[in-house]
Image (cartoon, helix red, strand yellow):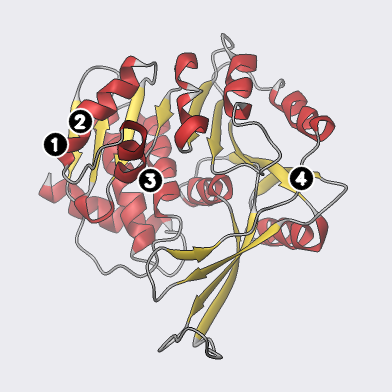
Amino acid sequence: MVYTVTFNPSLDYIVSVEGFQLGKTNRTAKEQMLPGGKGINVSTVLKNLGIPNIALGFSAGFTGEEIKRRVEEMGLASDFINLQNGYSRINVKMKDFDGTEINGQGPDISPAETEKLLEKLDGLKEGDVLVLAGSIPRTMPDSIYSDILRRLDGKGILTVVDATGELLLHVLEYSPFLIKPNNHELGEIFQVKLETREDVVPYARKLQEKGARNVLVSMAGQGAVLLDEMGQVHMLPAPKGKLVNAVGAGDSMVAGFLAGWLTKKDYEYAFRMGISAGSASAFSENLATKKEIEEVYRQVSQSA
């Protein structure tokens, strides 16, 4: 079974505002409200690709109840821990300004509530897959991801980490199966600017040397790069299509890669599935469906 963890889920309020002006009253032309958070996004695309999974995480207050309601409405299996205080965050994402977001802080999570999640993870078995994705509330230590991997070390569980900075670096000693920084996040780690696929390779290899088995680097319009644990370097340009909504594209890439790997145990196929799923979501109003991913995959296969 695949499990995803979202420590800090959200209600994503996605708006389109025509002619946005600072200091003025602006009105939306279009709007959506979706359950958000990187783990939930991964779970959604995995489900769309027919991979059973369970979304884990925390919820709080009226917004947490709405997140759970919408997750259930989407047909996702979930097992969220209810927090006693605070409320789950609302993130505002402006579609007309690519990458412009206002993200909430999220609720405080006590040590006792964190322990409840750790106890759930103790039940994972050999062959299970655990995806840790996204930010953590400010009250949690940036060692939480590595604490989890240390606790599960030696149990034969495939771990995937999609995080940034110290959250990511702390897990490398536990040999995660997959990490997925983007080129900007990778560059920030090593204080360099990475613009081409070739630029990425030596720095992705440094993360492998620190312990990561497979390093998948997303590069938006530049495509993606995979350094697999067999020593192979895979590169693909971005598929052609119109950018509609970049929210969740990186999470979709993780889900596509995992679905490809679990289906065929082949890194080239997993890589193509990853870039196809990420691009299909970027070309769609919502996270990509199986049909949309398959359409992009055909393009990727023809151009490879």
- Rendered location of residue 224, percent (x, y): 25, 43
In the drawing, what numbered circle is on residue 201? 2
> Residue drawn 44% across and 60% down?
247
- Choose mark 1 or mark 4, whichever is in front: 4
- Choose mark 3 or mark 4, whichever is in front: 4
- Choose mark 1 or mark 3, whichever is in front: 1
Give the vertical position of 106 relative to 153 (above or below).
below
Q: Earlier in the sequence, mark 1 or mark 4?
A: 4
> Residue drawn 50% across and 22% down?
171
The answer, for residue 10, to whether it is visible in the render is yes
299 sits left or right of 248 in the view: left
Residue at the disc numbered 4 = 108
> Residue drawn 11% across and 49% down?
303
Q: Are marks 3 and 2 in contact (CB under 8 Å)?
A: no
Where disc 4 sits, the SS reads loop
Give, as a three-letter code, the residue at label 3: Met
Residue at the disc numbered 3 = 253
Give, as a three-letter code, the residue at label 2: Val
Give the vertical position of 253 relative to 180 (above or below).
below
Where disc 2 sits, the SS reads helix
Q: Which corner quadrant holds the N terminus? A: top right
